[in-house]
Image (cartoon, grey):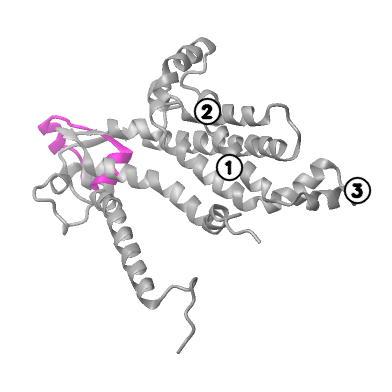
Amino acid sequence: MSAWSVTEPTARSKWIAGILVTLYAVVTLIPLLWIISTGFKSGPDSISYPPKVFFQPSLEGYVNLFTTRTRIGQEAFEALPPPETWVDRIVRRQGMVIAGPSKFGERFLNSVIIGFGSTFLSVFLGTLAAYAFSRFRIPLKDDLLFFILSTRMMPPIAVAIPIFLMYRTLGLSDTYLGMILLYTAVNISLAVWLLKGFIDEIPREYEEAALIDGYTRFQAFRKVVLPQAATGIAATTIFCLIFAWNEYAFAVLLTSGKAQTAPPFIPTIIGVGGQDWPAVAAAATLFLLPVMIFTILLRRHLLRGITFGAVRK
């Protein structure tokens, strides 16, 4: 008879856990798969009832997303030359012609600039602040940490009007700088608290040995602490990016043109006779890709970062 272990799960428990995880994954992936598939449907198929699971794939949604279309008179439409590209053919089938590119590309680029810019600043400043709180004696340290964390507890609507008035006075409304600073201010509290926990787990003896060897405090921080805290920095970066990438309330209030990001722009995609659901689904799919790719690239650091310090010797 084999020895029974308290920590080693049985074969039955492994099967049950595997089934539950699989069911959970399927349930959570269904909405995502439905959005992706809707992006490849035609307009009628996207609003059909009962909903169509099997359909003829079409790039109409992606064409509508990246182009601005218009209707012309019947005589002028019939006098048009044959369509030159597959994009023209899709638009002609809708009885319209291409008037120019849409603004989705600009809004998507704004999200990249503001999202990644604010994430970099949040993690950079949060790392420095977390190191200071972890390694130095700071008066009223606990009170300061609680104050920093309390800024994260406030709902955006509570400070929306004061921020709007302040930004309008300072000329920061609808600017890259204004949105980057705002998202940095919101995210830095999360960065400080997460990174302080990771840095606390790094033994001080490593830095003391480096200082004895002649390193300066900054060199010890850069060459000893940062490599050890890489997993925590990666996890914090992903959490900060997700907030900055998906943020909607401040983006709606403070941007309208030049610095508008994709979240407030996607709901405004209007088609003929109502919402263009294939274009909306295509925009949501493309908007999801950067964060998904970024998370996949850092997945090893993310898993190690979440469990860092969970087991103590």
Residues at circles 3 and 1 in contact by the CB criterion of under 8 Å = no
Q: Find numbered disc 1 in the image and state the secondary structure of the residue it sits on.
A: helix
| SS of the residue under disc 3 | loop
The quadrant of the image that shows the C terminus is bottom right
The question of residue 51 being in magenta is answered with no
Residue 194 disc label = 1
Q: Earlier in the sequence, mark 2 or mark 1?
A: 2
Q: Report the quarter where the N terminus lies.
A: bottom left
- Please report the bounds of the magenta region as a residue range: 60-83
Q: CA distance from mark 2 to mark 3?
A: 40 Å
Q: Which residue is mark 3?
A: 214
Q: Check disc 1 and give the amino acid type.
A: Leu
Front disc: 2 or 3: 2
Q: Which residue does the numbered mark 2 point to in the structure image? A: 150
Asked if 225 appears above or below 13 in the picture, the reply is above
**Circle 2: residue type:** Ser
Name of the residue lying farthest toward the bottom: 1
Badge 3 amino acid: Gly
Label 2 residue SS: helix
Question: In this orientation, does residue 257 appear?
Answer: no
Residue at left offset 30%, top offset 51%: 32
